[in-house]
Image: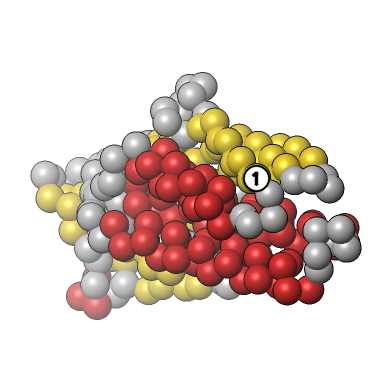
Amino acid sequence: MERKGNSGQVLVIAALIIALTIISTELYVYELGKTISEASTNSLNDYIFAIRLGCQHIVAGSLANVSQGGPNQTLIANLERWASLVGSQYYLGRAVLNFTPYEMQPYSSGIAILWGSEGLGVSSACVDFNLKLLDRELNVNVTYAINVTTTLLVQGTYRVIQGDEKQVNVTCNLLNEGRPALARDITLYYRNLNDWLIPGPQNNYAFTDYGNGTYLMSFVAEISSSDVEVSAHVYDQRNIYSQANVTCIEL
């Protein structure tokens, strides 16, 4: 089952605003507290960290947009704006932010969307960055990679109650960069013939949040086929969307 919306467009604007606020604040503190000749290592590290944090926001916001229906080129377009902003906001010398989106399979323009039918859904963005700060007193060259990846793992089992009536249990595990993460929203579908349906109170639907990125959903439904297919659609706390289908195992 495939589903993409367009509500992610506003996320790009939000990400840029957050990033601009971060860099503007750090520049103010950097310039107010130190002259070029007196700038401490900590001040410089804070500024570099602010740029990196801004890159993180741009990559995450762009991935949220693309995962909800935006074009892959969204990431590159936003990074170009961000790199231009970094250069124009640095008043102590010259700042150059270069970026290289991943192009190795399964990435295209830095984005990989892999929503499978075997219980695995991945929405990912990967970019290499190089930041250069040049002025009379210092030359800084920093390289780093940013990987934003939301992974959804879905498993399902069922047992026949009577006739076509089945008790279905579905477990979802959500990960951000390989670590357990919390979901903002989860919608579960099950297939009956050619229709995808959402289980509700009439199906004795129960939802359990274990608080560690693991979620259990159970329901009872009339399903004609012996193949019980379910589809989980999930938004993480960053508003990145992922989905995965799985055929449940009969107990």
Q: Within 10 angstroms of label 1, few (less than 14), some, or many (20 or more) residues?
A: some
Q: Residue furthest left?
A: 194
Q: Residue furthest top?
A: 104
Residue at numbered disc 1: 94
The amino acid type of the residue labelled 1 equals: Arg
Question: Can residue 105 be seen?
Answer: yes
Does residue 28 appear left or right of residue 204 in this picture? right
Q: Residue at x 80, y 58 (%)?
A: 36
Q: Please say if 201 is above or below 120.
A: below
Does residue 35 appear left or right of residue 1 in this picture? right
Q: Quadrant of the N terminus?
A: top left
Which one is nearer the viewer's eye here, 13 or 180? 13
* Residue 134 locus on image (x, y percent): 72, 42
* Residue 188 locus on image (x, y percent): 31, 60
* Residue 115 locus on image (x, y percent): 37, 39
**Residue 199 quadrant:** bottom left
Does residue 86 appear left or right of residue 43 in this picture? left
Q: Residue at x 86, y 58 (%)?
A: 37
* Residue 100 locus on image (x, y percent): 54, 31
Q: Residue furthest bottom?
A: 201
Q: Residue at x 43, y 47 (%)?
A: 81
Which one is nearer the viewer's eye here, 140 or 236? 140
Q: Secondary structure at mark 1?
A: strand
Q: How many marks?
A: 1
Q: Residue at x 37, y 74 (%)?
A: 206
Which one is nearer the viewer's eye here, 225 or 62? 62
Question: Can residue 170 be seen?
Answer: no
Q: Please say if 220 is above or below 178.
A: below
